[in-house]
Amino acid sequence: MFTKILIANRGEIACRVILTARKMGIKTVAVYSDADKDARHVELADEAVHIGPAPSRDSYLQAEKIIAACKQTGAQAVHPGYGFLSENAAFAKRVEEEGIVFIGPKHHSIAAMGDKIESKKLAGAAGVNCIPGVNEAIESAEKAVEIAKGIGYPVMIKASAGGGGKGLRVAFNDKEALEGFTSCRNEARNSFGDDRVFIEKFVEEPRHIEIQLLGDSHGNVVYLNERECSIQRRHQKVIEEAPSPFISEATRKAMGEQAVLLAKAVKYQSAGTVEFVVGKDQSFYFLEMNTRLQVEHPVTECITGLDLVELMIRVAAGEKLPLTQADVKRDGWAIECRINAEDPFRSFLPSTGRLVRFQPPKETMFAGDTLHLFGVRVDTGVQDGGEIPMFYDSMIAKLIVHGKDRNEAIAKMREALNGFVIRGISSNIPFQAALLAHPKFVAGDFNTGFIAENYGQGFCAEDVPHEDTDFLAALAAYVNRRILGRAAGISGQLPGHGVTVGEEFVVVGLGVGGQNTPRPTLVRDFQAKSGSSAVETGGKRYEICSNWHLGGARIRGTVNGQPFAAQVERGVGRNPLAIRIAHNGTRLDALVLSPRAAQLHALMPYKAPPDMSRYVLSPMPGLLVEVAVQLGQKVLAGERVAVIEAMKMENVLFATADGVVGKVLAAIGESLVVDQPIVEFE
């Protein structure tokens, strides 16, 4: 067995590998860029080596620097994680040539299956069902349109070396095919250094279901059940679960056996995943094979009780698989939510910056620990006070729960999301909460178009209806009473002029979540020591008890005897007295006032925000890579104005109305902040 391995990656997957290596008694080496010098994976590893500037092309994609770090530290093996160089056959081969073990499949397997065009030919030859399409690299956008028309819309335009939603577009007409081909090619060239693109038929109402494989160097291959990955936004997975609530035992077996045949055909060893698109009649077609560990591997670990990272390491060391197909179990139900740095209320635009607070829910199961399952697990590469840089992907953490059945897993996930505190940047937690509460998700009635169909016009606070909005107002009043109680107890107040606290309040909503109606509220029987109080609002009575303390971002306790978890934030927006309550994805911003103060507040004039309609604003932090207009140019609505690059994605800004460019306010190469003006129209 190895005594030292290097992890050629960053973030949560680097931390994940380190935890298993530590369990196995293996020392670890981290690599890091300028942006990651204070990152969590650097802190966790036994050693760390600096490999270059922040952009991944200058650091994490530099194979020679990774190999040099191995030699410098004496690392005997490299674990590539996922992304970056994990599916780069040339890198795997180069590592092997240097006498270093690649903890993954052999380079010939990566070359055979990592190329989406060649892999389809191999899959067909191995007897695996394949989707109709043209599996040859396409030379031009015009040729792409011609091929798409021949196949019949809709079509999927995919980069041959793509992955993780990069270099992928769905086109429903000639215009979308033309633009999609160009965007795919650009993204593929920038992200993977390979701009080959192909086209295949897009199966409507599809499910995305994948089979986890594990092979060794002795010719043994097993499949570890399936993962349901159909909840996607713009072809990137949002929620994954295992098993699938859709397929039958017969389909599971057929998919698994085909995946094994394919793996054996390319002499596959290590962990890998075969992805299928599954129709509503449970017909299934090969999509691609990911010759690496998947982001969503924890849900498989939960239901099988296996540590996939450990098995990858053991296989790379030449050991045989410790189990046969008959030994693979399926116990309970696991769900994973990807917690991303993006603002769901601003069209999911990237959100970068410092994590002012990062408090995940309490973990009861841990990465690499196969003994303590049926609980909550958090895989992350960040920590309180850390930075979310704009140079890499948007993932903050993966939240995983394991329940006895699907309903229990959903309930656990909703509770865990309630207790996941992230401040300083925006996250997609409200959106995840909305998905988990959606009746069709709960019923297992969804496909890959679920998010587009239900949130096609974007996501807003009203999309997360709360089952009891009076509870949010009651909790705001309870929190305010705790704050006032502490203020009243401060010593040194002038006699007759100290803070006095009554029982009557009015909760005035500030417009978030649609809770704008003033709510007369009574807070009775307040007990400072026990933290209990009776709150009456909306004709309901809430017996709330909690040990919440001032400054705490998370509040846990009981309401009418039932446990709850919610989040509290003070001083939100422009009002230092405002209180924000977040629960089950719904957010209430409110002032809790005395009845007289509420009357006076209603008379306050409304201050309208400044008119910014003449400006094109940066909707996110990012790098300005293109300005497509110039001074004096007449621009029509819908025309391209600028391109911003953030978190490895190109974001094109279009004019929303006709106008003439009066000023260009930002320069190419400039790092922009949110709402920074780029172009001003006359």
Image (spheres, rainbow, N blue to C red):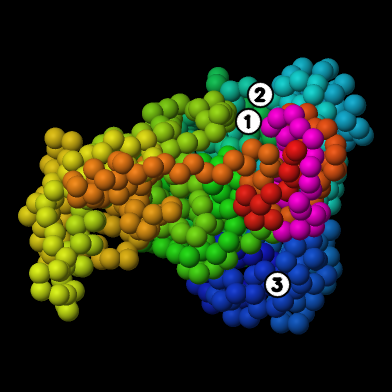
Q: In the picture provided, is 240 more to the left or to the right than 292?
A: left
Residue that badge 2 annotates: 203
Q: How far apart, in angstroms, are the residues tagged by discs 2 and 3?
A: 43 Å
Disc marking residue 34: 3
Q: How far apart, in angstroms, are the residues tagged by discs 2 and 1?
A: 8 Å
* Badge 1: residue crowd in 10 Å (few <14, some 14–19, many ≥20): many
**Of marks 2 and 3, the one in the foreground:** 3
Q: In the picture provided, is 211 more to the left or to the right than 581?
A: right
Viewer-side residue, 143 vs 116: 143
Res 595 visible: yes
Residue furthest toward the right? 139
> In the rendered structure, which amino acid carries the disc numbered 2?
Val
Residue that badge 1 annotates: 277
Disc marking residue 72: none
Res 214 visible: no
Residue 647 falls inside the magenta stretch = yes
Q: What is the quadrant of residue 57 in the picture?
A: bottom right
Q: Which residues are magenta?
A: 645-671
Please give the name of the residue rendered at 62% of the width and 42% of the height, measured from the top-left corner.
612
